[in-house]
Amino acid sequence: MYIALNTLYWFFTIYYVLIIVRVLLSWFRGQEWSYNIISFLSPITDPYLDIFRSFIPPLGSIDISAILAIFLLQFLADRAKVLAVSAAISSGFHFGMTGF
């Protein structure tokens, strides 16, 4: 159970970072170097962001839905981490000096 929850935690964390990078790069749409990265990240991140965009429309050029999407991912990552640690403790797993 610990391994599955820990894997879920890392999935949420990596996806969170990808969304942050995608949102930050959207500020540089006119730059050629950002277009290549955005075109790579869009198919990965936009399906999740589109869920929030469907009920929170952009306010001008500001996409508030991305903030909510990021907060939800951070919340889910934190919950997965807490559950992983509690599963590890209940099964007698020893963390040692390295922590989580």
Image (spheres, rainbow, N blue to C red):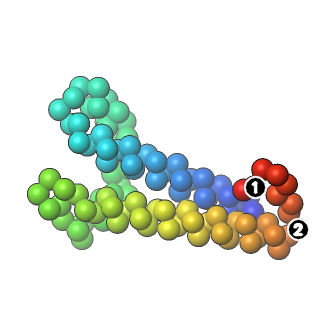
Q: Which mark is residue 34?
A: none
- Observer-side mark, 1 or 2, equals 1
25 relative position to 57: left or right: right
- Disc 2 secondary structure class: loop
Q: Is residue 26 above or below residue 79?
A: above
Residue at the location (46% across, 48% down)? 17
Q: Are marks 1 and 2 in contact (CB under 8 Å)?
A: no
Rate crowding at label 2 as few (under 14), some (14 to 19) or many (20 or more) other CA atoms within 10 Å.
Answer: few
49 relative position to 55: left or right: right
Residue at the location (26% across, 43% down)? 26
- Asked if residue 1 can be seen in this view, the reply is no
Name the amino acid type tagged 2: Gly
Residue at the location (65% across, 69% down)? 82
| 3D distance between C-alphas at marks 1 and 2 | 14 Å
The count of marks equals 2
Across and down, in percent, residue 50 comes to 30, 59
Across and down, in percent, residue 81 comes to 64, 64
Residue at the location (17% across, 61% down)? 58
Rate crowding at label 1 as few (under 14), some (14 to 19) or many (20 or more) other CA atoms within 10 Å.
Answer: few
Residue 62 picture quarter: bottom left
- Asked if residue 38 can be seen in this view, the reply is yes
Q: Which residue is mark 1?
A: 99
- Disc 1 secondary structure class: loop
44 relative position to 92: left or right: left
86 relative position to 22: left or right: right
Across and down, in percent, residue 3 comes to 74, 58
Q: Which mark is residue 92?
A: 2
> Furthest residue to the left?
60
Q: Earlier in the sequence, mark 1 or mark 2?
A: 2
Name the amino acid type tagged 1: Gly
Residue 30 picture quarter: top left
